[in-house]
């Protein structure tokens, strides 16, 4: 894979128990390429608690049915991912231009740091690092569940999500990053640097 060019600018986030993984894995150069007021960060434990129209789960609804997930169930799933945080890398893009509400008005003591959940989540995606025996215990990154809110599509947020996930996959040691998609999304993934390989097969229970 082509090298990721790290930027000298610091990430606006620091490693914390609230975040799924260390935000230092997200290249600052991608953060800098987002529209003003938008930030890219790891999924946060609190991302199910912000106002109902802007949660992570709401964002996933452009993909498929999400269903009713209680906060307790969300927390248990987040905790599982956190305990396997060298495997699951879920990221979100948050639009911080949205005025804070009482549900998400916490501020940071440092102006250079940003509090997750203050704005509105507008995009999400995951790369899963699979550990293999082949290729000398190689690792393969699987990109899953890419979603950009319907009213935010066309602003290159999907592209930035994919660039971030590719960079994370590369940094954690994956020798390739792959994904399955519908025919209509092929041109988007080609713009993101992917090419057709093989055929997807499925078996539904
Ligand atoms: N057909 C052709 N070109 C496209 C398409 C498309 N369907 N979608 C985006 N592009 C192009 C854009 O025009 C742009 O090209 P440019 O650089 O020449 O201007 C480039 O791809 C980047 O587009 P973005 O603005 O980053 O795309 P967006 O933010 O709208 O995200 C996405 C694209 C993720 C497909 C979004 O439309 C979406 O969430 N769709 C619904 C859910 C979905 O289908 N998710 C993908 C499932 S597959 C998976 O999860 C592995």
Image: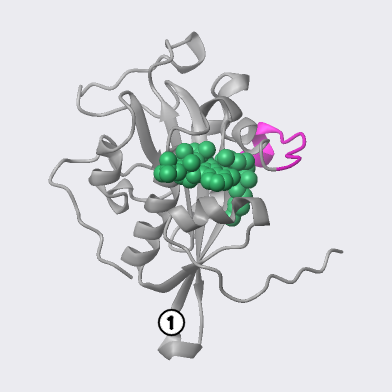
From the top left corner, tell me how far across and down residue 28 is, in percent.
24, 44
Residue 74 drawn above or below residue 86: above
Which of the 4 image quadrants contains residue 186?
bottom right
Q: Secondary structure at mark 1?
A: loop
Residue topped by disc 1? 138
What is the count of numbered marks? 1
Query: Along the line of sight, which residue is nearer the eye, 193 or 105?
Result: 193
Query: Along the line of sight, which residue is nearer the eye, 28 or 18?
Result: 28
Quadrant holding the N terminus: bottom left
User: Which range of residues does the magenta coloring cover?
Assistant: 64-78
Residue 125 drawn above or below residue 131: above
Residue at horizontal 18 percent and vertical 41 percent from the top: 10
- The colour style of the image is one colour
Q: Is residue 67 magenta?
A: yes
Q: Residue furthest toward the right?
A: 205
From the top left corner, tell me how far across and down residue 75 is, in percent.
60, 40
Task: Categorize mark 1 by other alpha carbons within 10 Å: few (<14), some (14-19), many (20+).
Answer: some
Which of the 4 image quadrants contains residue 107?
top left
From the top left corner, tell me how far across and down residue 64 is, in percent.
73, 42
Q: Is residue 198 magenta?
A: no
Residue 168 drawn above or below residue 114: below
Residue at horizontal 62 percent and vertical 62 percent from the top: 180
Residue at horizontal 57 percent and vertical 28 percent from the top: 55
User: Is residue 16 in view from this perspective?
Assistant: yes
From the top left corner, tell me how far across and down residue 168 is, in percent.
37, 58
Residue at horizontal 42 percent and vertical 38 percent from the top: 156
Quadrant holding the C terminus: bottom right
Residue 51 drawn above or below residue 73: above
């Amino acid at each position: 894979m082509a090298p990721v060019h790290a930027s000298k600018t610091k990430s606006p986030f620091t490693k914390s128990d609230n975040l799924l993984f260390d935000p230092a894995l997200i290249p600052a150069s991608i953060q800098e390429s987002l529209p003003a007021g938008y930030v890219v960060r790891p999924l946060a434990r609190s991302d199910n608690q912000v106002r109902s129209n802007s949660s992570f789960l709401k964002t996933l609804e452009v993909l498929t049915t999400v269903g009713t997930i209680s906060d307790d169930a969300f927390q248990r799933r987040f905790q599982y991912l956190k305990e396997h945080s060298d495997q699951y890398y879920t990221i979100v893009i948050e639009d911080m231009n949205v005025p804070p509400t009482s549900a998400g008005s916490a501020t940071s003591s440092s102006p250079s740091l940003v509090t997750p959940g203050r704005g509105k989540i507008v995009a999400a995606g995951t790369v899963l690092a699979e550990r293999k025996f082949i290729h000398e215990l190689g690792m393969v990154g699987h990109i899953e569940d890419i979603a950009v809110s319907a009213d935010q599509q066309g602003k290159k947020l999907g592209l930035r999500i994919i660039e971030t996930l590719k960079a994370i996959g590369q940094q954690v040691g994956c020798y390739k990053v792959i994904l399955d998609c519908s025919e209509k999304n092929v041109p988007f993934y080609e713009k993101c640097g992917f090419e057709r390989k093989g055929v997807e097969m499925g078996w539904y229970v």
